[in-house]
Amino acid sequence: MAKEQLVAKVVVSEKPDDDILRMVAEFVKEKGCYKTEYVIDPDILGGIVIKIGNKVYDGSLRSRLETVRQVF
């Protein structure tokens, strides 16, 4: 899939404010995406998950807690 056809799927725990929308737009544009789809999923507990093609940028609180749990 060509980069210009990539769609960023963004998962957040609550409706993002204007600053978050701007930062996400800049990030996905750097990755070659010009279309972004948002999904609100309270199960991630906080933070953000961005999926672009086969890549996942996981900054969710849930994944951080899972990492800590695995260490202990």
Image (spheres, helix red, strand yellow):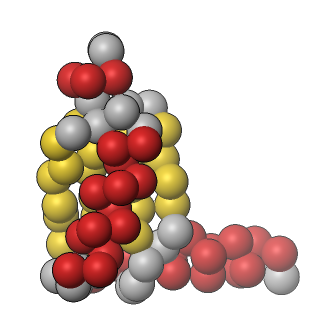
Q: Does the image show residue 41? A: no
- Which residue extends farthest top? 1
Residue 52 image position (x, y, % from top left): 37, 39
Which residue is at a point 35% across and 48% down the rendered structure image? 28
Residue 32 image position (x, y, % from top left): 36, 33
Quarter placement of the N terminus = top left
Dividing the picture into quarters, in which one does residue 29 lie? top left
Tell me if 45 is positioned left or right of 67 in this view. left
- Which residue extends farthest right? 72
For the residue pair 36 and 54, the one nearer the viewer reads as: 36
Q: Does the image show residue 2? A: yes
Tell me if 14 is positioned left or right of 66 in this view. left
Residue 71 image position (x, y, % from top left): 83, 75
For the residue pair 53 and 32, the one nearer the viewer reads as: 32
Q: Is residue 14 above or below residue 4?
A: below
Which residue is at a point 34% across and 23% down the rendered structure image? 3
Quarter placement of the C terminus = bottom right
For the residue pair 7 and 27, the one nearer the viewer reads as: 27
Which residue is at a point 43% across and 38% down the rendered structure image? 31
Dividing the picture into quarters, in which one does residue 35 lie? top left
Tell me if 59 is positioned left or right of 34 in this view. right
Tally of numbered discs: 0
